[in-house]
Image (cartoon, rainbow, N blue to C red):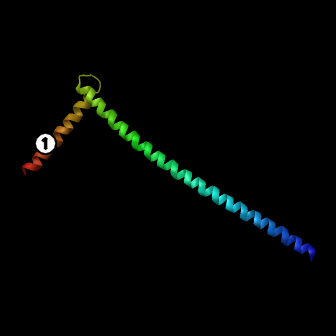
Amino acid sequence: MSVIAEIIDTLEYKVEKLFSKIKGLEKNNQDLRLELTKAAQIIQKQSEEIEALQKQYDTLKIANSLLGSDNNKRETKLKINSLIREIDYCIAQLSD
């Protein structure tokens, strides 16, 4: 009977170790999920900053072209033509 008791004790010990490992892994998983969420927020914020900087860059290119720079003249002309078409469309809508 003592052999069976030893087997049961060993089994109980191993089960307790497994539960301990499971709890540790669950905590690790929770920490990793939190870290992933923070990383996703940082990526979102950086993407928004990149988009804002790209808009500023485009605006500066247009302003530079308007000031007489030969660089990006074609883009500036296209943008101005696009704005003129939008204004014409708005005027036509107001006339109706």
- Give the image quarter of residue 51: top left
Q: Residue at x 49, y 49 (%)?
A: 40
- Give the image quarter of residue 11: bottom right
The secondary structure type at the circle numbered 1 is: helix
Left or right: residue 57 versus residue 29 is left
Find residue 58 and report its horizontal and vertical position in percent: 31, 34
Find residue 17 and report its horizontal and vertical position in percent: 76, 63
Residue sitting at the far bottom? 1
Residue sitting at the far right? 2
Find residue 50 and report its horizontal and vertical position in percent: 40, 39
Q: Residue at x 19, y 35 (%)?
A: 81
Q: Is residue 58 above or below residue 8?
A: above
Q: Quadrant of the N terminus?
A: bottom right
Left or right: residue 60 versus residue 15 is left
Left or right: residue 76 versus residue 38 is left
Q: Is residue 1 above or below residue 40?
A: below
Q: Is residue 78 above or below residue 26?
A: above
Residue behind mark 1 = 88
Give the camera-side residue of 38 and 74: 38
Neighbours of disc 1 within 10 Å: few (<14), some (14-19), many (20+): few
Q: Residue at x 62, y 57 (%)?
A: 29
Q: Is residue 49 above or below residue 32?
A: above
Q: Residue at x 24, y 31 (%)?
A: 76
Total numbered labels: 1
- The amino acid marked with disc number 1 is Asp
Find residue 45 and report its horizontal and vertical position in percent: 43, 45
